[in-house]
Amino acid sequence: MAKEQLQERTLDQMDDTQFVPLRDVGFDLAVGGGTPQNCIIEVFGSEASGKTTLCFEIANTFLKQFPKKNVYYYNYERSIDKFYVRNLIKDVECQKRFKIVDPIYLEDGMNHLFQVMDAKLGSLCIVDSLAAMTPKDEADKALDKAQVGGFKAKAMAEVCRKIGVRLGEGAQTTIVFINHVNPVLGGFSFIPQQITPGGKAVKFWASLRIEITVVDRLTKEEVIPGTTKKEKIPYGNVCRLKVEKNKFSPPYRRALTYIILGQGIDRAMSLIDYGLQIGIIGMKNKMDYYLTGREADTIRGKANFANKINQSQKLFDYLYSRIASYIEARRMEQKNINVDQLSEGNTFEAPKGEQTKEESEVEKMFRELQTEETDDGYSSEESSVDGDAPETSIEDI
């Protein structure tokens, strides 16, 4: 029997990888346009850094983008907040396609994952987490009979090879591994001080590796029950995303994202950060925000301005598209400039002609939005996180 002839293709004949935007401008720009499909992705970081929240947000956008596909969540950690998931995935039909699998051993969940891939239905599989996966041989082994090298590293090497074969055979499946970081005990100063459990196979096979770290807390003053004393209580985290590996776009890009506890990613907060740097959003008195071209209409406090953006889908889409197109244009000019270079003290100023065009576009958008009737329930009497003074509101957007 003659051997099967392998197909030869040129670069122009290769299929382009499909990306699903998270609609968080920092994340999308850092990874190269959104979450890539039909590959292995690893999201890792320390405890309570936002790994699971990020994956739930990825699942939500996936379910909206593909109405007939499912998401499988492998709950190795035996813990999930169903109320939090419902806050992130609000659509009832999407919730029905979010399947939770509770495997006991590493082999149980991975065999189920192989079945999903063999069905070739184009699903998203989230494994939470690689650190909690336990091979059956390791569970049966006595505690004092530890094996050098570990069962998990060898098992994951085999799992990744089988996943790679199925992806090569056309299994339209995206696999996201959630992983932790462990400190290196007794290591030297010139070697990495943190490692991820599960061996090196996932690092090798992953097409995208994202490290997420908490760099700051969002706090607000609240009165302690039973007393009159006020204390700053965290209500969210400022997280840094660092792309450690990327096979679809230049790696080592960084971005900031805002995670509100119990609600998920606040995409408008990132829009404000980048909008300030490229000049389509302005700020005065370090707490009053406005759109360029509408300096008279300001909102007191970053959180209140973010709420206004979230309540107007047209305004959100306008800011997102303008920021994304501007930064991508700058990258083309300056050879893939990093997103994290858009920081205070390194503002990119648009040419004068472009600024004039920008103001006219803003004015046109406001005229269109002012003719539409909105009923978003926004009240300017809400408390401000950045100050106690009442904010002035932009006219109905």
Image (spheres, grey):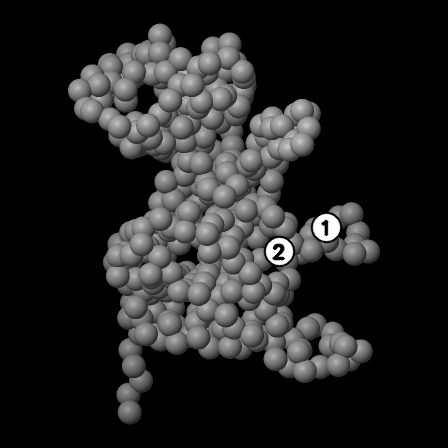
Q: Position of residue 205 (x, y in %)?
A: 50, 63
N-terminal label among 1 and 2: 2
Q: Quadrant of residue 113?
A: bottom left
Q: Is residue 36 visible?
A: no
**In front of the other: 261 or 364:** 261
Label 2 secondary element = strand
Q: Amino acid at mark 1?
A: Gln
Q: Which residue is mark 2?
A: 180
Q: Quadrant of residue 37?
A: bottom left
Q: Position of residue 244 (x, y in %)?
A: 55, 48
CA distance for labels 1 and 2: 14 Å
Q: Is residue 307 visible?
A: yes
Q: Is residue 226 left or right of residue 208?
A: right
> In what quadrant of the picture does the N terminus appear?
bottom left
Q: Amino acid at mark 2?
A: His
Q: Residue furthest top?
A: 296
> In what quadrant of the picture does the C terminus appear?
top left
Q: Which residue is mark 1?
A: 193
Q: How many marks?
A: 2
Task: Check residue 162 in the rendering and tell me which mark sits there, or answer none.
Answer: none
Q: Quadrant of residue 376?
A: top left
- What residue is rendered at 42% in x and 35% in y? 267
Question: Which class describes the residues within 10 Å of circle 2: few (<14), some (14-19), or many (20+)?
Answer: many
Q: Is residue 333 left or right of residue 74?
A: left
